[in-house]
Image (cartoon, rainbow, N blue to C red):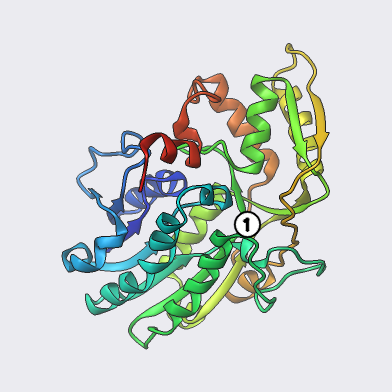
Amino acid sequence: MKKILITGGAGYVGSRLTPQLLALGYSIRILDTLFYGSHHLPLSDPNLEVLKTDIRGVSHHPKFFEDVNTVIHLGCISNDASFELDETLSRTINFDAFEPLVISAKKAGVKRFIYASSSSVYGISEERNVTESHPLVPLTLYNKYKGLCEPLLFKHETEDFVCTVIRPATLCGWAPRQRLDLTVNILTNWAINRRKINVFGGSQLRPNLHIQDMCDLYKQLLIEDRGKIRGQTFNVGYQNMSVMDIALLVKRVVQEETPVYADIRIEQSSSDDLRSYHINSDKIRETIGFEPRYTIEDAVRELCKAFKENKLPLSFDDDQYFNVRQMKALNVV
């Protein structure tokens, strides 16, 4: 049984990915600060080990990597708005801790290291299709540190230590540890519970990816031929849409799912968030045959279902749905 170490595995992606990996027969070790708790994980599974730890100290504890075959590095202060927090916190977790983590993993005999970067590293681009060779134009410290970590990983790659970087689009959809601070999820929450959608700007192009496609890609990378993924950087996105077009789609789907409720209105205002880019994901399809299968509409419908089943109570008031709010509430330093 192969052991997978997932940093940040109690977060949004990890909470959906972990049960799927366990079902496939993997043994999972999660390293996480547990800012959002661990109750949403299948803690009774004997093949799951959850260790509450700060990745800034992981390099001092080589035991974390014992028997580990692959590292999936999700742990970070996630999303641009999170840099409203102390800049030192974000730099030390997202950047300073990264290379020591890689070195420790390699020294312990880890064979694969998969790093979740971000497609937001491209910043603003008027290119019709932004490929992996496009210059990185970070607009925030989050973008900057995500991009700076990529060459640090490849610096340590060897024949026996396969390194892969993925640059995912903005994720959407339901997960046991839900986020309601991502574009599609935000708009769906407002549409369902307030019957109103606030659109800031609207013309910005944003690439999107269903969280299940993200999980499916990680599962494929665990078993993919090493020669195809060694030293590779892959964009992974599906639908590139403007924020306004996403809002219109959300409005239509939510109204279909909740026909007895009031109509949903869209209100538009200016925005200082200028990130706009249209990513091209041909490379990952041509290299390993990965193609997303789930749409933004699928994500909205599953969120509607989760709300109907009362899986997302207090969706505006509970800080745990919002990364920045939760960390501020915990006074994280």
| Quarter of the figure with residue 329 | top left
In the depicted view, which residue is nearer to us: 127 or 259? 127
Q: In what quadrant of the picture does the N terminus appear?
A: bottom left
Residue named by callout 1: 169
| Quarter of the figure with residue 7 | bottom left
Residue 259 versus residue 299 in the image, above or below: above
Residue sitting farthest toward the top: 260
Residue 39: percent from left, percent from top: 31, 33
Name the residue: 56% across, 36% down.
180
| Quarter of the figure with residue 237 | bottom right
For residue 302, side relative to residue 318 (left or right):
right
For residue 274, side relative to residue 29 (left or right):
right
Residue 152: percent from left, percent from top: 44, 78
In the depicted view, which residue is nearer to us: 170 or 211? 170
Residue sitting farthest toward the bottom: 159
In the depicted view, which residue is nearer to us: 207 or 292? 207
Residue 239 versus residue 107 in the image, above or below: above
Q: Is residue 126 visible?
A: yes
Name the residue: 31% across, 73% down.
100
Name the residue: 37% across, 39% down.
331
Could you tell me the amino acid type at mark 1? Ala
Circle 1 — which element? loop
For residue 92, side relative to residue 142 (left or right):
left
For residue 274, side relative to residue 85 (left or right):
right
Residue 269: percent from left, percent from top: 81, 36
Name the residue: 35% across, 41% down.
35
**Are there few (<14), some (14-19), or many (20+) residues within 10 Å of tag 1?**
many
Q: Is residue 73 visible?
A: no
